[in-house]
Amino acid sequence: MNLKRVRRLNDREAGNGPVVYFMDRERRMRDNWALIRAVDLALEMKVALKVVYCVPKEFLGAGKRQNDFMLAGLAEVAKDLRAKNIDFTLLDGDPAKEVLAFCKRVKAGFVVTDFTPLRLPRSWRDSLARDLVVGFEEVDSRNIVPVWEASPKKEFGAYTLRPKIHRKLAEFLTEFPEVKRHPFGSVGKEVEFGAMQKDWLIPGERAAMKVLKDFLENKAGDYAEKRNDPNEDFLSNLSPYLHYGMISAQRVALCAMGQEVFLEELIVRRELADNFCFYEKNYDRFEGFHAWAKKTLNEHRGDVRDFLYSREEFEQAKTHDAAWNAAQTEMVERGKMHGYMRMYWAKKILEWTKSPEEALEVAIYLNDKYEFDGRDSNGYTGIAWSIGGVHDRAWGERAVFGKIRYMNDKGLKRKFDLAAYIEKFNPSQDGFKF
DNA sequence: ATCGGCTCGCGCAA
DNA sequence: TGCGCGAAGCCGAT
């Protein structure tokens, strides 16, 4: 494999024990560069390979629904790995502590993990890099062009990252080797997963491939034209799978060659989100906005807001705006809001809260709690785009927004049948029960 | 239906 | 140093 995907996190020597893959962001057996790297090392060292996953007590406000989706996917991964003679262990608690203890217990000779730019899971990596007595590295198995190879800095917009990605696609957009039956070590007893609630979205690697196949066969041809109409079902629906690492964006790209509009979103815009979160530590805070955006939002702090809602009123879809309530209802009921409505939804939270800080907090809280694809660099970047003009430009100045791009429901009506959307996602008069 | 202006700053050409 | 143009728009003029 291309070793530019790999980054050393400490400078310790390898030991003699098994290679451990601390699986975190990439929950799949196929098309996973972090696992492929761990396999290569274990073969070279002639040792067993152990995959470990640690379920944190709490992860950025994810709900039970999201956790069940994740766990069901992991159950499939555990089974598939065992069939390849690769041991799988499920832990729970603080990953930094539990994975360290696990590595000590099995006398790990080397540890590999997958890459993420988010603060909390990065802190686990920092802690392991400090405390592990053997070599530790991470592999960018999320981005097609590894985030540190695509660019050495925070990019200004999609247009500045795009040429850098395209220049390197020939090098990185390659076929994956298959994981073969591992010749060293043996697997332990089967992992017990508790009962998980079924949802409209089927979890796991196989389900993800089916969703991809359905998209390519039935929707991709009309994607460019219909992707911004929330009444149409022409999106790929892959974002939950991509978020949980149940499918590789690189696999999706290999299958979707020629679908340029889709590939632009799948590759450039998605990898721009990891670029933002990796190089901007305040990716979910006001401080992470550009200087011009902070200046203009500061100048409009005192503006009168026509409507002010509490987090609870937003959560229960109790605003005056039927379009906003419908989007919120779609998110709560389906766990997935249509991409086009997400911009409108976040911008209205800016408009109807006391400060941009509060708007960010409310938008991130709701997005992380209800979306299958929440708690993801895409979500933080999308919200920063909506509320803080990140990767966007300044526009005509107006109240509250300043020069941040404004949106209203006239725009929605221009583009699709808003009444039909509102009819479809109609919140009950009493609000929701949680 | 379509067009230009709004407004900032990066990145590249010169 | 100048200049083109950008992640999804709005608005008013034509």
Image (cartoon, coloured by chain):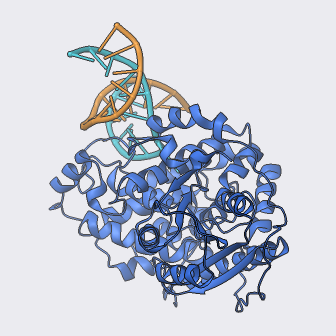
Chain colours: A blue, B orange, C cyan
The mark tally for this picture is 0
Q: Which of the two residues, A52 or A41, is positioned nearer the viewer here?
A: A41
Instruction: Judge left or right: residue A354 versus residue A86.
Output: left
Which image quadrant for residue A335?
bottom right
Q: Position of residue A225 (x, y in %)?
A: 66, 43
Q: Which of the two residues, A187 or A349, is positioned nearer the viewer here?
A: A187
Q: Which of the two residues, A307 or A55, is positioned nearer the viewer here?
A: A55
Q: Residue at x 66, y 34 (%)?
A: A170
Q: Is residue A426 above or below residue A250?
A: below
Q: Residue at x 27, y 46 (%)?
A: A403
Q: Position of residue A137 (x, y in %)?
A: 54, 60
Residue A180 showing in the rendered view = yes
Q: Position of residue A352 (x, y in %)?
A: 31, 67
Q: Position of residue A197 (x, y in %)?
A: 70, 87
Instruction: Judge left or right: residue A83 versus residue A172.
Output: right
Q: Which of the two residues, A38 or A222, is positioned nearer the viewer here?
A: A38
Residue A408 showing in the rendered view = no
Instruction: Judge left or right: residue A386 versus residue A40.
Output: left
Q: Residue at x 54, y 79 (%)?
A: A99
Q: Is residue A84 above or below residue A415?
A: below
